[in-house]
Amino acid sequence: MPNIVVDIANMAVSNNPEDILVTYALGSCLGIVLYDPVVQVGGLAHIMLPDSSLENGSPSFNPLKYIDTGIPVLYKKMYQFNAQKSRIHNAIIGGAQIMDDNNYFNIGERNFAAVRKVFWRNNVLINKKHVGDRINRTVRLEIATGKITVKLSSGSTIVL
Amino acid sequence: MIDLNKIKSEVTALPPFRETILRANKMLSDPEVSARELAAVLRYDVGATANILKICNSAYFGVKVPVNNLQQAIVNIGHQELKNILIISGTMPYFTGTQSGYEGEYGELLRHSIATALLAKRLGDYLDRPDEILFLAGLLHDVGKLVLGTHVREEYPSIIQRVEQKSLPFHEVEKEVLGISHDEVGGMILEHWNFPEEITTAVRHHHTFDVTEQSDTALIVALSDTLSNFMGTATFSDGIYYTGFGGLAAHFKLRLEDIQIILSHSVREFMEILDVFSSS
């Protein structure tokens, strides 16, 4: 089955039932999964940082680097494939903490907090999540079924 | 436990590091070096020549007429960029074809190594400690995994179980279970390749650094390795299981904002480099 690899600060949306979207080794980054079961459209983004405010109007700004700007871009792409907001399920995966003595910056936690803020402002609830802790995660989304699997660095694979 | 003599013989069995790459790299640290002199050294390295021409003709450099002359390509690319390209193309053959116990399923080791090299170079510049060897040291910091990878694959379940249960850093359990850790093996490999002491030390201590003892070069490499976790480019199996990030960030007085700026800039550069090398 064809795998479509989503790299850092990037996304993919598909309605081809043969496709599996995958993003590897999330670390503190977040994988944002969206799926509309009625039109069988799925999207996956791999986002790195919480807040685009540090960009300061850079000319080569890539919205998919940041949660606050990346999530809207992913939703808009879903709408282009005839997905509807009210039908879209979401899952948030990643946001790990590195094994550190004093949790210096907590970028993983900040990323997840940024998701909650964006969703709250847009009246969206988080449907599924597998976030935090000291786990590296690889995420797969099957377009045909909407099935989401998460491979963990601790060795196992789970279905969300 | 593996027999350490076995590791030693695996290290000495590695083919030598390509000398043209090291020679050209050294020449490139002289800003006055001419494209003609560089071309004279590089034209005997078929792989490097092919990569330089390919990159020079890629969309990134936006040339209108294809360049097929090595010397012209060197002029177009510019010294700094050329240095990165040369070092990566010289190192790539060692990474291809490995499927080690550190990687999930995606060959992350080369990606992680390139990301760490870029982060190290950028961190050095950001911290006002520009250093010619940071890129190479970052690229090679995990070279020990090329030898230890198959052994780690066999023992991964027991290593990871102990890492999780005891909250121990990965390289410590690696040493407990296998008798040696990948950072130590990396040091052995660079010694075998006769690399400069400073790079060898940085590689050997990228998990066992001491901020009061190690050079800034070694510490910047260690910090870059950790930062790759925030850029989605750590190796899957072990990347997250190391300590010491807080101490390093504090040592260099880095704030959250600094870290985010460095990551944000590095990711673009990373994607450009991947583009260049993805089809080679």
Image (spheres, rainbow, N blue to C red):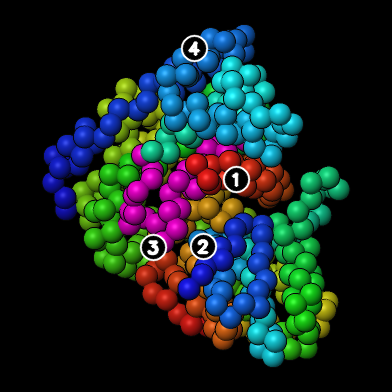
For disc 3, the chain is B
Residue B62 x %, y %:
73, 34
The residue located at (29%, 62%) in the rendering is B156
Residue B276 x %, y %:
58, 41
| Placement of B275 over or under B161, stated as above or below | above
* Of the image marks 1 and 4, the number of the one nearer the N terminus: 4
Residue A72 x %, y %:
79, 69
The magenta segment is: B94-122
**Dot 3 amino acid type:** Ser
Mark 1 crowdedness (10 Å alpha carbons): few <14, some 14-19, many ≥20: some
> CA gap, disc 4 to disc 2?
41 Å
- For numbered disc 1, what is the local secondary structure? helix
Residue labelled with disc 3: B167
> CA gap, disc 2 to disc 1?
17 Å
Residue labelled with disc 2: A24
**Residue A83: quarter of image:** bottom right
The residue located at (66%, 57%) in the rendering is A9
For disc 1, the chain is B
Please tell me which residue lies in front, B162 or A64: A64
> CA gap, disc 3 to disc 4?
53 Å
**Residue B60: quarter of image:** top right
Residue labelled with disc 4: B40
| Callout 3 touching callout 1 (CB < 8 Å) | no
| Placement of B9 over or under B233, stated as above or below | above
Mark 3 or mark 1, whichever is nearer to me:
1
